[in-house]
Amino acid sequence: MTDIIQLLPDSVANQIAAGEVIQRPASVVKELVENAVDAGSTVIKIIIKDAGKSLVHIIDNGCGMSETDARMSFERHATSKIKSAEDLFCIRTMGFRGEALASIAAISQVELKTKRVEDDLGTCILINASLLENQHPVSCPDGTSLAVKNLFFNVPARRKFLKSNQTEFRHILDEVQRIALANTDISFSLYHNDEEIYNLTAAPIKQRIINIFGKNLNQNLISIHTETSLAGIRGYIGKPEFARKTSGEQFFFVNNRYMRHPYFYKAALNAYEKILPPNTFPSFFIYFTIDPSRIDINIHPTKTEIKFADEIAIWQIIQATVREALGKFNVVPSIDFEIDSLVEIPLLKSDTDVKQPAISVNSEYNPFEKNTKKAGASSIIFDYRKKDNLTNWEKLYSGFENKDENISIQTEKQTLIQQSPATTFFQLKNKYILTPVKSGLMAIDQKRAYERILYERFLSALENSQGIVQKILFPKIIELQAADASLLKEILPDLNRLGFEINELGKNTFSVNGTPSDIGSYDANKIIEGLIENYKNSQVDIKITAREKIALSLAKVSAVNYSKPLANEEMQALFDSLFACSVPNYTPDGKLIISIFSNEEFEKRFK
């Protein structure tokens, strides 16, 4: 039998390495920009075409490379940052493995131009799928210009699995944000299809955060600063009242490197315990300074997962630091004197006879005596050994089938209509709508009912392009952060089909000139911002179409909220519209809308 184990050719090995390091165009941006940072650059320009599928071009004013170094940089494991195994435990640079350029060159067409300050001419290298096509001297500025063209052109299976341009560009924005937040002393500019997205000058941390995420964040930030023997912690955290429904503004950096760390993330969230609005996430930008020998950054190809030697102690430091900052700025829950008190405190006059509370005790009661029935003792004694409760267990599972339940509730509606053309409705706590039915009492969740109604209307409008525009007298101007602006551009055609009239003004700014007539007179800015938040935060089935997701997100943010009192006519209209829906029982994301309390349940309560 012949030998079957052999060494892979370098071109194949590089493509395999590319699968670990280069997952999408954003991975190319990350690796090349980190190399530019390591080169000592003070200005980095990022040019993107077609979300990086056609071009990723990084230009820096760093130290540049010699002719030999330029050629060697494309070899596997060629690096200027590691000379021995011990160096792995004192790394302060971004890149160090020496695989990025070799991996990128294996799956694209690369043009490199680089020049050192002391050299008269630079070097130009052209590589096509790991094959060196040309190398020659060239006149170019100091620093490095590296253009990556036609990513995955020779690996069509990988290219086929890339997402839409809008989705891929959002990933690029995420990478640029992380690097820009970690290196605030460097100027960054980002262009996509010749449109300027970012122009970030060197600035303090707070100003860099505001420049990336918008001026609205300015009043939201609280500074933190702690120095310990284990680590130094600084940065900013967000005030609880400005928490968002998506977890997109939580960042950790260690020695100016972005990292993911679920354990530390939990520590920061725990510090906000009981002071956050429900289902929201606070912003935080936390920077660690720590001895490199106390961390291990070589546990993942993308170098974003980092192991700490003192995780438990640092967890406690994070929580204490965030809590101290919140306490220092008096960010604590306050008593709302406008709401009805849950505890009734009686007013006593000076001549009121106050009696000491008394407790009645039955001295004859014996808890060990079987079938006891004496004065003061309960006449109902449950014996867990009896097997009466094992009968009729099937009833526990009745009504769980959606089809049968829909039929039952539709039958109840028909009965109501036959009984009286004007059904009686009651509103409970401005949250539930109650109406008597033949089998008992029907309860309808007010907000969820509106979500179902609006969802089906929006979906129909999207499919038939029949959205009715309600013009706004004074157009609203909305300024979004780059990632949200990119998302809005992606769904803008469908929003306009729904009845929105939104125009792009450039530089992440939009003009809202009209909204769908179905959503009433809500604030246009809040509608758009809420729509984006719900769209990003949607946890619906992965098979759902983009249009269904848009309809669901808009229905959630547009639905009449709890706490709104409704007139009987409004409840009647809601009732009729709900039962005209294809699935009145459940919201589009599977939450129960209708529940019927049977006559038997009421009778049991009064036995």
Image: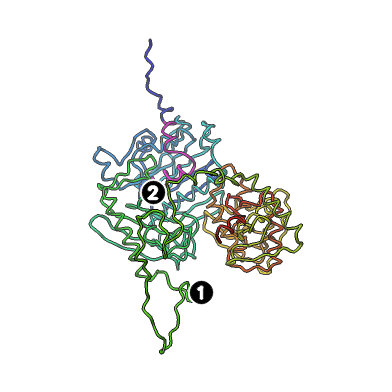
Circle 1 crowding by C-alpha within 10 Å: few under 14, some 14–19, many from 20:
few
Q: Please identify the quadrant where the C terminus is shown.
A: bottom right
Residue at the disc numbered 2: 260
* Rendered image: mark on residue 267: none
Q: Is residue 30 magenta?
A: yes
Regarding mark 2 in the picture, which secondary structure is present there? Answer: loop
Residue closest to the eye, 128 or 575: 575
Q: Position of residue 166 (x, y in %)?
A: 56, 47
4, above or below 509, in the image: above
Q: Three-letter amino acid code at disc 2?
A: Arg
In the picture provided, is 442 more to the left or to the right than 63?
right
Q: Quadrant of residue 531?
A: bottom right
Q: In this orientation, does residue 58 appear? A: yes
Range drawn in magenta: 14-34
Q: Please identify the quadrant where the N terminus is shown.
A: top left
Residue located 34% across and 34% down the image: 77
Residue at the disc numbered 1: 340
